[in-house]
Amino acid sequence: MAIEAVTSASVPVFRFEKESHDFGEMKEGDVGTTEFTFTNEGEVPLIISSAQGSCGCTVPEYSNAPIGPGEEGTITVRFNSAGKPGNQTKTVTLSANTVPNTKVLTITAKVEPKAE
């Protein structure tokens, strides 16, 4: 029995301009914000069902609206460095109707501790 392969064209496909962002040096307590822009390169609408930060200091914002074929979408990620001195690497895991159904975005920062 032949198994029909799913072509990438029949499912939504994330194509990000970048998948990581380095905030560089920041002072403890600063809040950094960045945007991850993507295009749906599939032939059907892309729907993001959830976006989870790896901790409470990393907050993603996104639209639940379907992103049509060829359309762009944006994930905004806010990082609060309060209580996070030192080198930081945080992730945002997106769940969507893509194959594979998750995508991980990464942010990094070097957080200068508050003066005692």
Image (cartoon, rainbow, N blue to C red):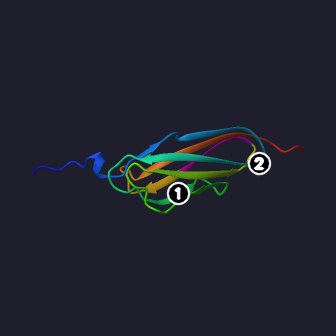
Magenta highlight range: 86-92
Give the residue type that dot 2 points to: Asp
Which residue: 47% across, 62% down?
65
Q: Earlier in the sequence, mark 2 or mark 1?
A: 2
Which residue: 38% across, 46% down?
41
Which label sits on residue 20?
A: none
Which label sits on residue 51?
A: 1
* Residue 54 inside the magenta-drawn segment: no
Task: Give the crowd class for mark 1: few <14, some 14-19, many >=20 residues within 10 Å.
Answer: many
Task: Give x and y (percent) for residue 42.
Answer: 34, 49
Relative depth, front residue between 30 and 64: 64
Going by the image, does 30 lie left or right of 88?
Answer: right
Q: Secondary structure at mark 1?
A: strand
Residue 46 location, quadrant? bottom left
Residue beneath disc 2? 30
Going by the image, does 22 lie left or right of 72?
Answer: right
Total marks shown come to: 2
Which quadrant of the figure contains the C terminus?
A: top right
Relative depth, front residue between 79 and 86: 79
* Residue 87 inside the magenta-drawn segment: yes
Give the residue type that dot 1 points to: Ala
Which residue: 37% across, 57% down?
45
Q: What secondary structure is the stretch in magenta mostly built from?
A: strand
Task: Give x and y (percent) for residue 43.
Answer: 32, 51
Which residue: 59% across, 47% down?
35
Question: Furthest-left residue in view?
Answer: 1
